[in-house]
Amino acid sequence: MQQPIRNIAILAHVDAGKTTLSERILFAAGEVRRPGKVEEGLATMDYLPEEKDRGITIESGVAHFEWKNTWFNFIDTPGHVDFGAEVDTALTAVEGAVLVVSAASGVETQTVAAFRKLRESGVRTILFVNKLDNPDYSLDETLINVEEVLGVRPVLMTLPEYKGGKLVGVLDVLSKSRLVHSESGEEVVDESWPQDGEVSASTEKLKKYYAEAVEFASNFDDEVLKLALDGKPVPPKILLRGLKELAKSGDYALCYAGSAMEGFGVRSLTTALSFFLPDVPEFGANELGQVIRLRHFKGVGEISLFRSHTDMERKEWPAGFEFSRLKANLLQPVDEIRSGDIYAMRSPFETELGQIIYLDGQRCAILSEMPQGMESKDLDQPPTHSSIRDKYQPLLQTRVECLGSEDYHHVEKSLNTLCRMDPSFRVQKDEGGFWYLHTVGEVQLDVLLSRLKREFGCEVRAGSPEVRWQERLCRPVGPVENTFQLGPHKISIKLSATPLDGDAHDIRLSAEFLETAPREILAGVRSALLESTEIGVLGKGPLVGVCFEVHEFTWTEGALPPMIKKACADAVVKLIKPADVGLYEPVMELSLECPVNFAGLVTGDIQSRDGKVKEIGGDGKTHFLKAEVPLRKIFGYATGVRSISKGTALYSMKLLGYRPAGNL
């Protein structure tokens, strides 16, 4: 019988202790001799120089370990909002996840966002309440906070034990045992606990939470229910079966508590991952696997993070393919691949995120959405992956140019590679010989520029980032006609446009065009029109909420795709004039916590940035607020708020929406 495989991710708000927990799991499993510390830049999973410098996770790190005869692929995901696309791509390849909640801060904005992602992805989730090495942080208050904010009932499976104000162990509810540290720092079962006949506060607590687990599990297992109603003890093995069913429920969440920094509660959590997560799914019979991430290593080049959909030995691999284990940034070749397992793949062609590779080494096409007027039956291969790229709205644009014209093609190729690696990053080429980088935030921009130089050896000159506005069509325009001819080939288009509510685009093609045009012409027209909306009319941002109607389209046989693109782009320029569009600017929701003695300074600073405070709260020690602030007024906020709060303020931002410029 083959060893079971579990693919897991760890998610959390920034500074909740997610990467520290990852290190502790690897230590518990014997993968590392000692857990690396994030604050010292020694975390195994954070291998990029940018991660070590900032103390945050940027790329989803990958590691492997064995525990309780189960093979784990372990993905540590970023908590920073700028790298949310990394979380999304990681979740396409996992069956289960650990959501870390800091007992110091409770459920925070990115905790909620991560939990929502997990629910939308259908990923089974186990909670870990962290930072309980400080006895001033309340486990009970955190559990109440989880239930109120996340809407699930936490079922506590470990609880901390203190002595003299210090965390000295954890009590494991399911095994009714006490775990302490050995001399080497590993968590081990305290075989001498409890002493014969000993009744203590700890043993009473354990009985209480075991009974609570039985009560919850009885809703999902008839034998547990019958034993409980008869007043008979429920053995751990039977309770485990009931908890496995409970773990599938959306109303409950198994919850483990401890301290990643001190290494308490980690062993019980890791065991739970082998007990309560589902098996890897069944895959298509003719599939080799799917690309789930792209990476670029200096001296190695591009690799694909790849989830295998089959069992196959090296001699059967398609020509030109190589597979390795990836541990952080280290590649270790393998001689076979297993269904459901995750590998680093070298292939004879460029791959795309979400791409399915077939057993014969052929790849399917990647389409984020179906072209207007076309159905999946019309395509050689139906779409297999919903594009994560469409979920992220770049808020900043930065002009970048080469230091020397001889570097142009190398920089362009490198930018396109980074764009393929990060679904939330986009590159817009300008005919003037430079590029606009479209990024979610400033941190993402800084990291991309750093990697462009370090990994690809590109020296570029970057301008200051600017807010990426939205342009909206104010009125119906057209129709106009445009013709483009190159040699014997000629393309003509008759086009009009009308405004739509919302940010979506629509493209309507005439019935005659739909009936007579081949698939590649239809797709080319649609792609060209959508690409023209990315550039916008005023150069301030994308044109959104527009419906293009193609009344007529004619072409000569042999017309090339660049000709279609040119004809459509010129038609849009003729159709929509600057006076036809209005500008809308992004407004952010800022959530902030700081000590109460800095409340006045922090609030005043937000108001000086044209921010509107919408919510204020606190507990007498900590001040909390939510505000709406225009993005253009909040550049460099990290430095400013750190200065006025002496580094004590914690904040997060998310896009609230777009509002007409000048009417905030």
Image (spheres, rainbow, N blue to C red):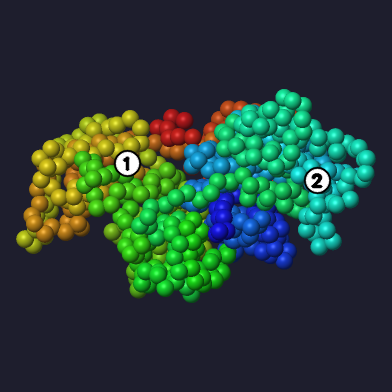
Q: Residue at horizontal 71%, vertical 58%?
A: 28
Does residue 627 appear anywhere in the picture? yes
Residue 522 in the image: above or below residue 290:
above
Closer to the camera, 368 or 422?
Answer: 368
Does residue 132 appear anywhere in the picture? no
Q: Residue at horizontal 62%, vertical 60%?
A: 65
Question: Alpha carbon of mark 1 to alpha carbon of mark 2: how far?
Answer: 61 Å
Give the x, y percent position of residue 595. Answer: 73, 38
Q: Residue at horizontal 19%, vertical 52%?
A: 520
Closer to the camera, 262 or 274?
Answer: 274
Tell which tag, 1 or 2, sits nearer the viewer.
2
Q: Earlier in the sequence, mark 1 or mark 2?
A: 2
Q: Amino acid at mark 1?
A: Leu
Quadrant of the snapshot with the N terminus? bottom right
Q: Which disc, if any, is residue 543?
A: 1
Q: Residue at horizontal 40%, vertical 32%?
A: 660
Q: Residue furthest top?
A: 229
Give the x, y percent position of residue 621. Answer: 76, 34
Closer to the camera, 344 or 392?
Answer: 344
Q: Which disc, if any, is residue 177?
A: 2
Q: Say few, some or many: other residues with alpha carbon within 10 Å of mark 1 (under 14 / 14 to 19 / 20 or more).
A: many
